[in-house]
Amino acid sequence: MEDTSPVMLLGLDPRWLSAIIFLVTYALLISERVHRTVAVMLGAGLMILSGIITQDDAFDGVDFNTISLLTGMMILVGITQRTGIFQFVAVWVVKKAKADPRGILLTLATITAVFSAFFDNVTTVLLIVPVTLLIVEKLELSPYPFLFAEIFASNIGGTATLIGDPPNIMIGSAVGLSFADFIVELGPVVIVIHVVILLLLYLLWARQLNTSQKARARVMAFDERDSITDEGLLRQSMAVMALVITGFIVGEHIGLQSGSVALGGAALLMLLYTFGRSGKEQSARVQDVLAELEWSTILFFMCLFMMVHGLKAAGVLTLIGHEMVRLTGGDIQVTTFATLWLAAGASAFIDNVPFVATMIPVLQSTASHLGGSQEMTPVWWALSLGACLGGNGTLVGATANIIVAGFAERSGHAISFVRFLLLGIPIMLVSVSIASGYLYLRHFA
Amino acid sequence: MAVIEHVRCSAIMHSPPTHLYMDNTVHEAIELLIEHHMYNVPVVDRNEIFVGEISVKRLMGLLLPVSLSMEKGLRNTSFMRESLDDIKQRLDAVRDKPIAPYIATDITVVYPDSPLIDALMLLFHKYIRIPVVNREDGRLVGGISLITLLRAVETLD
């Protein structure tokens, strides 16, 4: 039988070696001198080459449920967005607000939050922000209030569901929390946070948002129905999305994991998208959809899981977990709030995906000291709330923020890091404070 | 054995090429494009050093809302309603501004001593007109387009 046990290089302690590999990779991620996918590919490769884990161990460390869920949702969103539904809803709500800038601020931020919860926040801002820029250009207004509101709403909305933000996908998959669990547990607090933040933004900017009747008439002349490019595909997309969400909800009762549901839905929608067409056209459509998948993100997640698995296999995460238990005194309440604020603070400055990927096994290792996995539930909600809401702290706190900043710069309205920070940090503090109060009332009062 | 002539870009380039200066206005650029029925015009500084090109696509971008013309901008625009007045308003806003911010600077050039095939491949894959610049000082010395090429080929007869 083949020996697959790890062989150490240079006789180095695997804990030190894995920690060094991990920290160097993290430094590369923070510095952004190396593309994040390349950085974690190097980290995962070094974990294997140095003998900390074998290739088989590395593959075992990949959470394929998360990978399937991400890939499936990318395909579903990729096809759905071709129908023009995002633009339709954006223009529709703007017209419902009678093209009044204050109403537009509130409605566009709200649909950004809702789309972010049920699709994903990166796709949402990619599709909503260009429409927003067009509308504010027609209204002859500064785009900043609208763009800032959409950034905050995308991160807040994405917190509400299993599929809204990648940290939730990872937490849900690792801990076995379902789509319904997320909606029930986080939905109410996300609604409260969204309303409070919108109210604050409204109070801050309402006076500046004035425009002429002529400018409003230009926007009211838009016809949202013309933005729908394929009604048949829209109906099919909506039906499949409804099926997928139903699958997420009932799947937990029949042993069907969310990754299978999402990939199943993606397969069904691709079938509908290509059905009845010639072989050549089917091939072109499939290639077109697959070409738009974010392969670098998928590879990033896979290699990240491998790298974190190396750290776990070497025993480093258990050590950190023990230290965490010592610092919190093994108290579940202290651990919950420490996790919430640590996750928020860290996610404001570094990518929340590697942070959460690392924290999951750390927290799992503390479960036996904190009363078992059932008792740990508030800690997982704290990790989700902290990691997602923390993204609002700085301009680099979330991918959605960086995408909006890119749009802003290309449209001639660059958002500086400090300008965002001055509003982002207070918004984050208010959001996380509300989350703290909610967790306390729900689990510890 | 027959010797195949190795043709250089200098053999067929038209010179001097029509060009704009960096401090010309958008209005002057439009006038030139219309006058010469050109789709892209090389731009030089006051020392005649090549700096880039101004193209119809770049100018077209000025006539559209920013959210449509920018990279990764809005593609699905059927819901919009645009009037000629809207377009004129946007043009009026930039008409008297210098063209400098709208110049595309990532233009591949050829040199007078470059093999002609380099220019032909650029014409085939990328550009309508290739600027020819002096290898030593970067001065614009000529241009090669499909018309230039066809004229050169026709004269062989």
Image (cartoon, grey):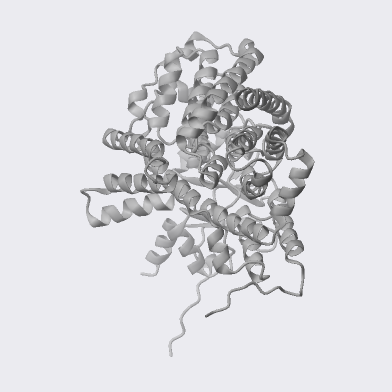
Name the quadrant containing residue A166. top right
- Where is residue A211? Give x, y as percent: 55, 12
- Expressed as whole percent of the image width and height from the top left, the position of residue A322 reads 74, 49
Determine the residue positioned at 35% across, 44% down: A265
Viewer-proximal residue among A120 and A438: A438
Please give the count of numbered marks on the rendered protein: 0
**Spot occupied by residue A39 in the image (x, y as percentages of width and height):** 65, 57
Which residue is at the front of the view, A315 or A390?
A: A315
Q: Is residue A58 visible?
A: yes
Q: Residue furthest bottom?
A: B1
Q: Residue furthest right?
A: A327
Q: In this view of the protein, which residue sits in the foreground, A376 or B38?
A: A376
The vertical placement of A179 against A291, above or below, is: above
**Quarter of the image where one finds residue B100:** top right
- Point out the image quarter for the C terminus of chain A: top right
Is there any visible trace of residue B24 in the rendered image? no
Residue that protrudes farthest toward the front in the picture: A371
x%, y% of residue B122?
A: 48, 60
Position of A77 compared to A323: left or right? Answer: left
Residue at image location 42% in from the left, 56% down from the top? B147
Q: Which of the two residues, A108 or A142, is positioned nearer the viewer here? A: A108
